[in-house]
Image (cartoon, grey):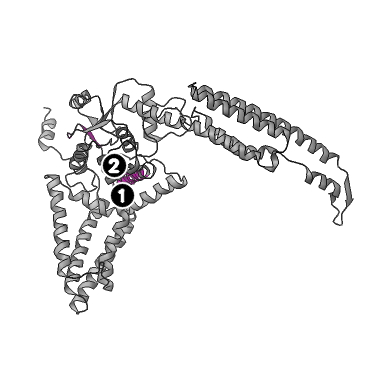
C-alpha cells in the first residue's frame, strides 16, 4: 500500500506516522497489527493478544521487540531485556505501558477518536480568532492611515462579517460553513480595497510619466522638478499595510487544514517517535494499555556501530521532542502515576549532561586534588558505597536473572549521543530547525572500524587512564590522601570497564549465525 496523491511533495509527510495515518484512511479493520518491515510475527500473535480487547477501554497491547540477528554477547546493546521486561511490566501496573512503534495491536476506535479530538481542538481556535480579529480592527481604526472613507468602509465590512460569524457559531451552525462565508466576505472587502489602490497607483504612474523634467544637472543627469517631489511626498500610499494584522488573524479561520494531506491525523505527528506521543494522548483520553510479556515477533537489529548510533539518536530526539511539546507532568487527563511513568522515560536522556560531571569528577581529583564533594571521611563512604552496592543489587532483583549490564554500559557510554539529541531536538522545537527522519538500515554498512564515531569517548577514556596513573604516582610519593585516591582510582576503573564496550562495538563485524554441522551433513547426503 502506497500513499495517495494527496501526499504531494509540498505537504508534510511525517515519515512513519504519515504512512500509518494514510493507511488508516484506506482500511477499515477494527484492530491494527503494526509491525516494522523487518519484523516476522509468530502465527498465533493475534490469538495471544486480541483477548485483552474484551475490555472495551483497552486501546493498545504492546509485546516485546526481540531481534534474531544478535549474538549472546550483544555487543551493540540491541536487545533490551530490562525495558521489555521489568520496566514495561512496571509501567503496565500504572496503566502507562506505551506504544513502541512495532509488535503492537491498536484499536481503530481509539486512534480515530484521538484524531478527531485533535481536529476539534484546532477548530476551537476559530472562536478565539474571530474575537482577536475584531480587536485588531479596533486597533487599526486608531491608525493615522485609516482616515480615508474607503478604508473605513472596508473595516466596517470586515467587522460586520466577524460579528455575524460569532453569532452563527453561537447558534450552532456548522463551523466549516461559517468560516467559509466569513472568509468570502473578508476577501471581497479586501479586493475592493486592492482595486481602489491599483487605480491610485495607475494614476501615480501616469503623473510620473507626465512630469516635466528640470534642467540638466552638473553631472549631465536629468532630475525631477522640486514641485513634483513635493506632490509625490504628500500623497497617501496604499492603506493595505494597515490591514495586515487583521488579515493575519483572519487567516486562522480556515478549518480545511490545507497544509496537511488529510485533516484528521490519528497518530501523533509532533515527533519522529510517533509511538510514545500517540500512546500518551490515548492515556490522557482515558484509554488503557496492556503490556503482554511474550516474544511474538522477531526482527533485525543494527549490525554496525554507525547504524546503531543513528537509531539511538532518533529515539532520543523523538522522546525529547515529546517532552518539550507535550510535557507529561502538565498534560490534562493523565493520572499522577502515568505522568511520572512517562516523565521517567523522557528525562533519562538528560543524563548525557550529568555524565560529563560524572567522568570529570575523578579526573579532576586525581590530577589536581580537588574533591568532587566537600567531604573525605569514613562517614561519607559508609553511606556512599552501600548505596552503590544496593543500586546494583536492585538491578539484579528487578531483572530476575535477565542481563542488565549491557544496558547500563550504553546508558553511560553514549553520553555524546544523548547530548546531541537534546540540543538538536530543542533547536527543532524552539527554533524550527529541521530534524529529519533517518530510517535504520538493516544491512551492515561497509568499511573498516569507525573509531571517529566514538572520538569523545576515546578522549574521556584516555583522560581517565592518565588520571589514574597520576593519582597512583601522587599516592606513592605521599602527595595524595590514601582513601580518596583509592576510591577515585576504583571509580576510574569502573568507568573504563563501562567504556570498553565501545571498543567491542567498533570491532563488531556483524552477526554470524551458528552452523548446524549435523544438518549440513544431512543436506550433503541428500536427506
Q: Where, by quadrant of the figure, is residue 25 drawn?
A: top left
Q: Residue 315: x percent and y percent? A: 32, 43
Residue under numbered circle 1 = 349
Q: Residue 262: x percent and y percent? A: 44, 27
Which quadrant of the figure contains the N terminus? top left
Q: Where, by quadrant of the figure, is residue 195 drawn?
A: top right
Tell me what residue is drawn at x 26 percent, y 73 percent: 369
Q: Residue 383: x percent and y percent? A: 15, 62
Q: Is residue 287 found left or right of 394 in the rendered image?
A: right
Point out the residue furthest to the right here.
Answer: 215
**Residue 179 lies in magenta, yes or no?**
no
Residue under numbered circle 2 = 339
Q: Is residue 364 above or below residue 444?
A: below
Q: Nearer the viewer, residue 197 or 7?
A: 197
Q: Is residue 236 above or below residue 395?
A: above
Q: Is residue 470 above or below residue 497?
A: below
Q: Nearer the viewer, residue 478 or 133?
A: 133
Q: Where, by quadrant of the figure, is residue 21 drawn?
A: top left
Point out the stretch of residues depicted in magenta. 291-320
Q: Is residue 505 found left or right of 424 in the rendered image?
A: left
Which label sits on residue 527?
A: none
Amino acid at each position: 500500500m502506497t500513499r495517495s496523491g494527496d501526499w504531494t511533495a509540498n505537504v508534510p509527510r511525517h515519515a512513519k506516522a504519515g504512512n500509518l495515518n494514510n493507511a488508516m484512511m484506506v482500511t477499515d479493520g477494527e484492530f491494527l497489527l503494526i509491525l516494522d518491515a523487518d519484523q516476522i510475527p509468530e502465527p498465533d500473535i493475534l490469538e495471544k493478544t486480541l483477548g485483552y480487547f474484551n475490555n472495551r477501554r483497552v486501546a493498545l497491547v504492546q509485546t516485546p521487540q526481540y531481534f534474531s540477528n544478535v549474538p549472546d554477547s550483544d555487543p551493540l546493546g540491541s536487545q533490551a531485556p530490562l525495558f521489555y521486561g521489568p520496566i514495561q511490566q512496571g509501567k503496565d501496573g500504572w496503566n502507562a505501558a506505551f506504544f513502541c512503534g512495532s509488535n503492537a495491536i491498536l484499536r481503530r476506535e481509539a486512534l480515530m477518536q484521538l484524531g478527531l479530538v485533535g481536529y476539534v481542538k484546532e477548530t476551537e481556535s476559530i472562536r478565539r480568532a474571530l474575537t482577536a480579529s475584531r480587536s485588531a480592527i479596533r486597533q487599526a481604526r486608531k491608525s493615522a492611515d485609516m482616515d480615508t472613507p474607503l478604508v473605513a468602509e472596508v473595516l466596517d465590512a470586515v467587522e460586520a462579517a466577524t460579528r455575524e460569524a460569532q453569532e452563527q457559531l453561537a447558534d450552532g451552525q456548522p463551523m466549516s460553513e461559517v468560516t467559509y462565508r466569513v472568509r468570502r466576505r473578508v476577501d471581497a472587502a479586501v479586493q475592493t480595497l486592492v482595486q481602489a489602490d491599483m487605480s491610485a497607483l495607475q494614476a501615480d504612474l501616469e503623473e510620473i510619466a507626465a512630469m516635466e523634467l528640470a534642467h540638466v544637472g552638473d553631472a549631465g543627469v536629468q532630475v525631477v522638478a522640486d514641485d513634483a517631489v513635493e506632490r509625490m511626498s504628500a500623497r497617501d500610499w496604499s492603506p493595505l499595510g494597515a490591514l495586515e494584522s487583521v488579515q493575519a488573524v483572519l487567516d486562522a479561520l480556515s478549518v480545511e487544514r490545507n497544509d496537511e494531506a488529510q485533516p484528521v491525523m490519528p497518530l501523533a505527528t509532533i515527533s519522529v517517535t510517533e509511538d510514545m506521543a500517540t500512546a500518551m494522548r490515548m492515556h490522557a483520553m482515558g484509554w488503557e494499555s496492556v503490556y503482554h510479556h511474550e516474544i511474538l515477533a522477531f526482527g533485525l537489529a543494527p549490525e554496525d556501530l554507525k547504524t546503531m548510533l543513528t537509531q539511538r539518536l532518533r529515539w532520543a530526539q523523538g522522546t525529547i521532542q515529546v517532552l518539550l511539546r507535550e510535557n507529561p507532568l502538565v498534560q490534562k487527563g493523565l493520572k499522577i502515576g502515568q505522568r511520572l511513568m512517562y516523565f521517567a522515560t523522557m528525562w533519562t536522556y538528560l543524563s548525557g549532561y550529568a555524565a560529563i560531571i560524572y567522568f570529570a569528577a575523578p579526573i579532576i581529583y586525581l590530577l589536581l586534588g580537588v574533591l568532587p564533594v566537600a567531604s573525605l571521611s569514613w562517614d561519607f563512604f559508609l553511606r556512599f558505597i552501600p548505596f552503590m552496592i544496593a543500586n546494583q543489587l536492585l538491578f539484579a532483583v528487578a531483572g530476575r536473572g535477565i542481563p542488565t549490564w549491557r544496558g547500563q554500559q550504553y546508558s553511560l557510554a553514549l553520553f555524546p549521543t544523548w547530548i546531541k539529541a537534546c540540543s538538536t531536538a530543542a533547536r527543532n522545537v524552539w527554533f524550527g530547525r529541521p530534524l529529519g527522519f533517518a530510517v535504520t538500515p538493516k544491512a551492515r554498512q561497509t568499511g573498516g572500524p569507525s573509531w571517529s564515531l566514538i572520538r569523545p569517548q576515546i578522549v574521556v577514556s584516555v583522560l581517565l587512564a592518565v588520571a589514574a596513573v597520576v593519582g597512583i604516582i601522587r599516592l606513592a610519593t605521599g602527595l595524595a590522601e590514601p582513601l580518596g585516591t583509592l576510591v577515585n582510582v576504583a571509580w576510574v576503573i569502573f568507568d573504563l570497564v563501562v567504556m570498553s564496550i565501545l571498543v567491542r562495538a567498533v570491532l563488531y563485524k556483524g552477526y554470524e549465525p551458528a552452523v548446524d554441522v549435523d544438518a549440513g551433513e544431512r543436506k550433503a547426503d541428500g536427506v
